[in-house]
């Protein structure tokens, strides 16, 4: 199919300034992010200036650990500059261990972002061959306990994990992020890597409604399943987001993230790309857009299914082609574990 050039509003990037987010941040950003290294990764000796306020604490070890976890597969470095990342605190250690078991089945390398020191030390002691770093904010207090959606601790944790991803992106690594309550039964990485968008996200749906599962404007993407390429536009967006809304997280990161993304799109600085059959709410993915724009697109809503997929039968999941499930829209750690076990996504050996 021949590519068609789409005329879009001129991006406002001549001085690398994102004015559309000023309503959130009350300031503009004018410095140019560090250039991507020719091989896609910034060597540690060339690390860019920190993307975070001095009031925040971020372990510089995350950059080193991302470098060591780069490549996706543990047998050899097939995908340099690509890092699988998850994040958890001590309260979710049991679920994290099970997540690790599923990742190990497919010989994945991955980086664990520990959101408290208790989990960080436990991973170092029990799994010395795994890659782990810690990220924390001195203002959020003790974050070791399990928390539930929209609780104050949940909001703080969700923004901390996004802050860690922003730092990894800022060092030139692309991130395939999977929450610890995500499970899969086949190697899903090749499907994700083929995405042409800067940011590919899971469509967030609470229940299965036939013929109504594709992304619509009223939907949010789930910030527990996404693939973010380390492009200049993505690095800027994550930087602005963690230095703005996530410094005062009265809401969870997902709500804040999609408000910011919608603002950027409304300004003409981001563009939603969709398969041709869904192009009535976005630009067809087969058309070219300016490389200066942030492009975002949904992952296949059936292959990469959110919480609705655990509420249908296993035969229906097979018919729909579900490859990944996400135990969201469930309250508390216990209910997540029970649902994953019931659906057959807990046992991994």
Image: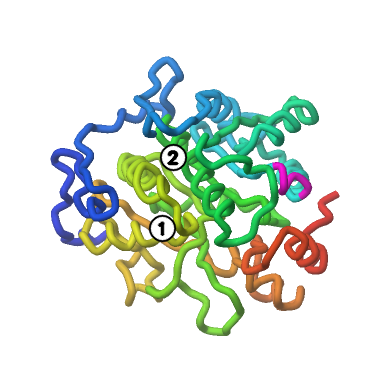
Q: Residue at x 21, y 59 (%)?
A: 268
Residue of label 2: 166
Instruction: Decide: is 24 above or below 118.
Output: below
Q: Residue at x 34, y 57 (%)?
A: 260
Q: Position of residue 93 (x, y in %)?
A: 75, 44
Q: Nearer the viewer, residue 299 or 26?
A: 26
Contact, CB < 8 Å: mark 2 with mark 1?
A: no
Mark 1 crowdedness (10 Å alpha carbons): few <14, some 14-19, many ≥20: some
Q: Nearer the viewer, mark 2 or mark 1?
A: 1
- What quarter of the picture does the N terminus occupy? bottom left
Tell me: 273 left or right of 123: left
Q: Position of residue 291 (x, y in %)?
A: 26, 47
Q: Main secondary structure of the magenta part?
A: helix
Mark linked to residue 256: 1
Q: Nearer the viewer, residue 292 or 50?
A: 50
Please report whichever mark, 2 or 1, sits nearer to the chain's N-terminal start.
2
Q: Quadrant of residue 130?
A: top right
Mark 2 crowdedness (10 Å alpha carbons): few <14, some 14-19, many ≥20: many
First to last magenta residue range:
90-94
Q: Position of residue 16 (x, y in %)?
A: 20, 40
The secondary element bearing badge 1 is classed as helix
Q: Residue at x 20, y 61 (%)?
A: 6
Tell me: 109 left or right of 95: left
Any part of residue 255 in sight: yes
Q: Position of residue 311 (x, y in %)?
A: 70, 76
């Amino acid at each position: 199919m021949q590519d068609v050039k789409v005329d879009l509003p001129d991006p406002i990037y001549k001085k690398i300034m994102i004015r559309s987010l000023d309503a959130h941040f009350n300031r503009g950003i004018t410095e140019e992010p560090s250039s991507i290294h020719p091989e896609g990764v910034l060597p540690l000796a060339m690390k860019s200036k920190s993307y975070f306020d001095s009031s925040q604490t971020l372990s510089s070890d995350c950059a080193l650990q991302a470098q060591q976890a780069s490549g996706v597969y543990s047998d050899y470095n097939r995908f340099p500059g690509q890092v699988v990342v998850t994040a958890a605190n001590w309260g979710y250690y049991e679920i994290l261990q099970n997540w690790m078991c599923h990742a190990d089945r497919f010989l994945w390398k991955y980086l664990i972002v520990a959101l408290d020191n208790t989990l960080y030390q436990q991973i170092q002691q029990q799994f010395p061959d795994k890659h782990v770093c810690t990220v924390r904010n001195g203002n959020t207090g003790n974050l070791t306990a399990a928390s539930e959606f929209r609780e104050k601790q949940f909001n703080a944790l969700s923004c901390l994990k996004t802050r860690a991803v922003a730092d990894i992106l800022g060092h030139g690594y692309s991130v395939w992020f999977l929450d610890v309550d995500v499970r899969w039964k086949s190697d899903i990485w090749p499907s994700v890597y083929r995405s042409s968008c800067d940011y590919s996200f899971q469509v967030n749906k609470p229940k299965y409604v036939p013929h109504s599962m594709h992304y619509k404007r009223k939907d949010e993407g789930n910030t527990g399943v996404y693939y973010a390429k380390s492009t200049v536009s993505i690095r800027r967006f994550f930087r602005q987001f963690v230095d703005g809304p996530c410094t005062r997280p009265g809401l969870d990161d997902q709500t804040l993230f999609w408000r910011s993304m919608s603002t950027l799109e409304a300004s003409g600085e981001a563009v939603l790309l969709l398969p041709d059959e869904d192009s009535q709410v976005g630009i067809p993915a087969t058309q070219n857009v300016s490389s200066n724009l942030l492009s975002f697109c949904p992952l296949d809503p059936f292959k990469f299914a959110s919480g609705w997929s655990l509420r249908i039968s296993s035969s229906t999941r097979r018919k729909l082609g579900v490859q990944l499930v996400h135990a969201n829209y469930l309250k508390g750690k216990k209910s997540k574990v029970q649902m994953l076990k019931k659906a057959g996504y807990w046992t991994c050996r």
